[in-house]
Amino acid sequence: MDLGLSGRVVLISGASKGIGRATALALAAEGMDVVLVARNRELLDAVKKEIEGKGRRALIHAADLKEDAAAQAAIDAAIKEFGKLDLLVNNAGATKGGNILTLSDADWRDSFELKFFTAMRLSRLAWPHLKKSQGGIVNVAGVQGRMGVADFIAVGAVNAAFLLATKALADMGVDDGVRVNAINPGTIETGRLTARIERHVAAHKGTPEEAKAALMKDERVARFGQPEEVGALVVMIASRPMDFMHGAIIEFDGGKTRAL
């Protein structure tokens, strides 16, 4: 099936590892050129080489997107290099866990700045280019945005705001021809899961395998997801055969979310 992605251009935030890296490789495999944005240039270089190995072009933009000027510089670099922008994947940002008593004001500000405000800034700046190309946005949020959990209050609040913004952007996109959708990943096997397993081992003195099994039991899932699976879902959402998908919020969590 022709997915209609070949020759198009995507900008991905948080592209140096995990879901961002996997998404970049998946889209490049379908013929897209990729603008890679993250803070770690060394990791971005490695992703760039992998993409070029697939015969596509990749542009690195190493920057801290919490800085006000960084988003504009990334969009400008994309347009200068490729002359257009067809897709934005808002993937940057990891929000700090903790409850209302343990999170400081600085933690709250950082949580919203790193994920929500960064995504809104990129979306605003990319919008005129996406309108011109009749392109789209895929927001990578998280299942915590649909569940109130004491120790993930900031995580949930940020993701809930992100999901509401997805719906609002999709509403605007009806008139402007910009498709906007979101993915709520569950637990994916990235560095964040590794850190959780390490904390579980330290607290319970078991093995990493036992810790992983215990976490899966707690979440009532048969297994955890892989970054490549999220990347494949982004490809599907962005593809031309899925043009009718607009304003969707997709749970991709192995059945973790049991709410309607």
Image (cartoon, rainbow, N blue to C red):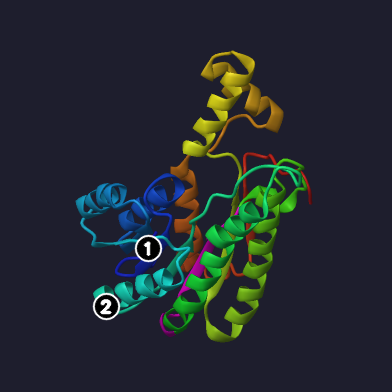
Quadrant in which the N terminus appears: bottom left
**On the image, numbered disc 1 is attached to which residue?**
2
Marker disc for residue 14: none
Check contact, mark 1 vs mark 2: CB within 8 A.
no
Q: Position of residue 176 (x, y in %)?
A: 54, 85
Three-letter residue code for mark 2: Lys
Q: Secondary structure at mark 1?
A: loop
Q: Residue at x 39, y 65 (%)?
A: 11
Three-letter residue code for mark 1: Asp
**On the image, numbered disc 2 is attached to which residue?**
80
244 shown above or below 49: below
First-in-chain label (1 vs 2): 1
140 shown above or below 99: below
Please report the bounds of the magenta region as a residue range: 132-141
Q: Quick check: 256 left or right of 223? A: right
Q: Position of residue 202 (x, y in %)?
A: 57, 20
